Amino acid sequence: MPMLIQCADKPGHLKMRLDTRGTHLAYLDSKKDIILAGGAVMDAEGNPCGSVLIIDTEDEAVARDFAENDPFNKAGLFETVTVTAWRKAFFNFENLT
């Protein structure tokens, strides 16, 4: 069963997110073999304010290590990081953009 990583940014840290984005994307690229899906969570103004990643592992320790080593997390961007098991119930490939 894959693991879901949910991260909420600290309020007022958009600049930190933008400044660290390149390093974060390089990290994700280095881990693409285990990433099933991921992206930013957006606030009401359309600015990123968190992250969601689904990774292909059943080992919670692997998911926690993944989250801990994310450059966003290392920079101190996240207020909270939650790791939970995830089971796909529905996925509509036709609606992907």
Image (spheres, rainbow, N blue to C red):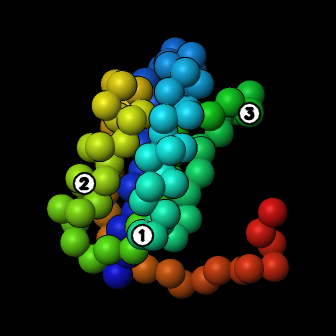
The residue labelled by disc 3 is 46
Pointers 2 and 3 in contact (C-beta within 8 Å): no
Q: Position of residue 56 (x, y in %)?
A: 39, 74
Amino acid carrying mark 2 in the image: Arg
Q: Is residue 23 left or right of residue 96?
A: left
Marks 1 and 2: which is nearer the front? 1
Question: Of the residues under marks 1 and 2, which one precedes in the sequence?
Answer: 1
Which image quarter: residue 89? Answer: bottom right
Marks 3 and 1: which is nearer the front? 1
Amino acid carrying mark 3 in the image: Gly
Q: Residue at x 18, y 62 (%)?
A: 61
Which image quarter: residue 90? Answer: bottom right
* Local crowd size for mark 3, using a 10 Å CA cut-off: few (<14), some (14–19), many (≥20): few
The residue labelled by disc 1 is 34
Q: Is residue 43 visible?
A: yes
Q: Position of residue 53 (x, y in %)?
A: 47, 57
Q: Is residue 91 above or below residue 42?
A: below
All told, the count of numbered labels is 3
The residue labelled by disc 2 is 64
Q: Residue at x 51, y 70 (%)?
A: 36
- Residue 48 is tagged as none
Q: Position of residue 17 (x, y in %)?
A: 53, 26
